[in-house]
Amino acid sequence: MKVDVLIIGSGIAGLSAAIALAERKRNVMIITRAQDAEESNTLYAQGGIAYKDPHESLKSFKQDIVSAGAGLVNTQAVDRLIEKGPRYIEEILLKKVNVPFDRSHGKYDLGREGAHSEFRVLHSKDYTGKSIELALLKYIERFKNVTIHTNKTAIDLLTLSHHSLNPEDRYKPSTCIGAYIFDQTSGVVETVFAKETLLATGGIGQLYLHTTNPQGARGDGIAMAYRAGGRIINLEYIQFHPTTLYSRERINRFLISEALRGQGAKLINKKGKSFMRLYHKFAELAPRDVVSRAIHSEMLKDNTECVYLDISFKKSSWIKTHFPQIYQTCKSQGIDITCTPIPVVPAAHYLCGGVYVNLSGETTIKGLSAIGEVACNGLHGANRLASTSLLEGLVFGTDCALALGKKLHDTTYYFPKVAPWKTGKEAVDPSLIYQDMNMIKQTMWNYVGLTRGEKQLLRASELLQEFNSQIEQFYKNGLLSDSLIGLRNMAMVSLLVMKAALLNKTSKGCHFRVD
Ligand code: SIN
């Protein structure tokens, strides 16, 4: 099969890019490993999307991103985000796809989250990501030149390397011409040729035992780009969300949006004492890395498994209207948040690093772009400011597509013959895959987690190298499945994260070295 553009991933970045390309009459194929097109990190984003306070100059917005990023941000990326963000929200999300953001007295009801100095966050109750995702998918239905394929897992990128006797050619980047795609239903591996390929596969939360991220966040895009020779950066900067619902029974953590703290919710320890003022002048609204470590430290001090977040001072009806999803989910676990503090713990949430890209989303491999969480243009530096991830997907997804629209017009592409994918034949017991995934998650959680030290990292290094070589072997002979592909990617990306954390001895933002 041949397409103009292959987009791997169907969250806000991939869908924004698809819309801009479809409008430029390009034929676009979107694939997702999930059963439903909406299943993506975007679907689970609660708090909101940063817009602008009507009275602000946007200077303070820039300053907030730079400060949260602990001085490591690429200010050109920040300038692009704040210059284009409000415009794209208006043109695309409000006028074109009609996202139902909350209003109050005829105006958009702007919220505030951690490390924001102004009220500038647009939201749709506590399921903003879902409202955006569904509106984008609905809008895309009108384009005959966009097809969405679910239950299809990208295995590897198709790349041409430059074999030549000219020594100079060694430094030429390889070229991506599509991907091998595994059809989960038929078990067949398809070769999809694409003039341009876009990675929009999201993050890596599933490398950790506890995460707010869905099943697909297992680093597929990073692993594919790395295997193809792409540059990967800043993998040590993994943001832990400070407040996720603590439960002994459940591994995956339900997010308790920072928007609650934006509305005044207080963090309290086991003794019922508020503690955030001891750690930062912004207290509950300090940057996420600071809040997460403060919670961790209180838990260690009190030898307890969680701290608590209290919003019960607000009227019960107000809580139920503004945070219906959080209210219902906590209630289903026996916690009435209108009168009881919520038990919370930090969990892996967002990758600030990723596949290195420029502001147009180009990677170091020709024909391959990356957008959204899988990509890193330096926007978030060492720690992401709340409610900028949806905005990043919208802005850089759209801008990448605009640049590609022009490139597709000016470039001649050709596709050589490639060998069909060779797959192993040995059936793999799913419980073995589950067990290996669990070992990776435990190792990452215990040794490459919220805080890191050389001893733990070296232990992780031994374990992960061993897992990697075993899994690679097992993968070669095993009958292909979505989970086997995921396991191989998880093993590889865990090793990369561990190496990045080991090499970087300086604590900054969400990379915190105890030594
Ligand atoms: C939240 O609602 O707290 C998460 C939003 C984000 O990660 O930006």
Image (cartoon, grey):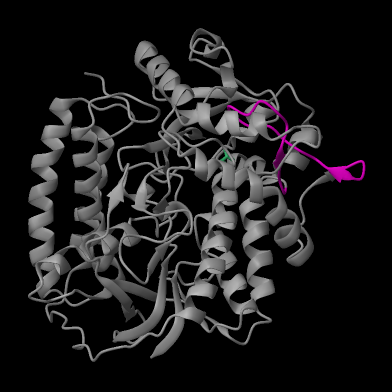
Q: Which residues are magenta?
A: 104-124
Instruction: Please state, as top left, top right, bottom left or bottom right, where the C terminus lies in the image.
Output: top left
Q: Nearer the viewer, residue 45 or 86?
A: 86
Residue 105 sits inside the magenta stretch: yes
Picture coordinates of residue 96 (x, y %)? 75, 66
Tell me which image quadrant ligand 1 sits in. Answer: top right
Q: Residue at x 61, y 71 (%)?
A: 20
Figure label count: 0
When the figure is inspected, residue 226 is found, relative to residue 178, above or below; the finding is: above
Viewer-proximal residue, 307 or 205? 205
Q: Position of residue 105 (x, y in %)?
A: 92, 41
Q: Considering the image in quadrants, where does the N terminus appear?
A: bottom left
From this viewpoint, is residue 368 visible?
yes
Q: x and y percent of residue 11 in the render? A: 53, 62
Query: From what the image shows, is residue 467 above or below residue 268?
Result: below
Percent x, y for residue 452? 25, 27
Q: Is residue 377 magenta?
A: no
Q: Main secondary structure of the magenta part?
A: loop
Q: Residue at x 27, y 45 (%)?
A: 441
Nearest the eye: 394 or 435? 394
Q: Is residue 64 left or right of residue 424?
A: right
* Residue at 11%, 43% in the rendered image: 463
Image quadrant assignment for residue 219: bottom left
The residue sitting at 13% across, 79% down in the picture is 424
Residue at the farthest right position: 105
Q: Is residue 46 visible?
A: no
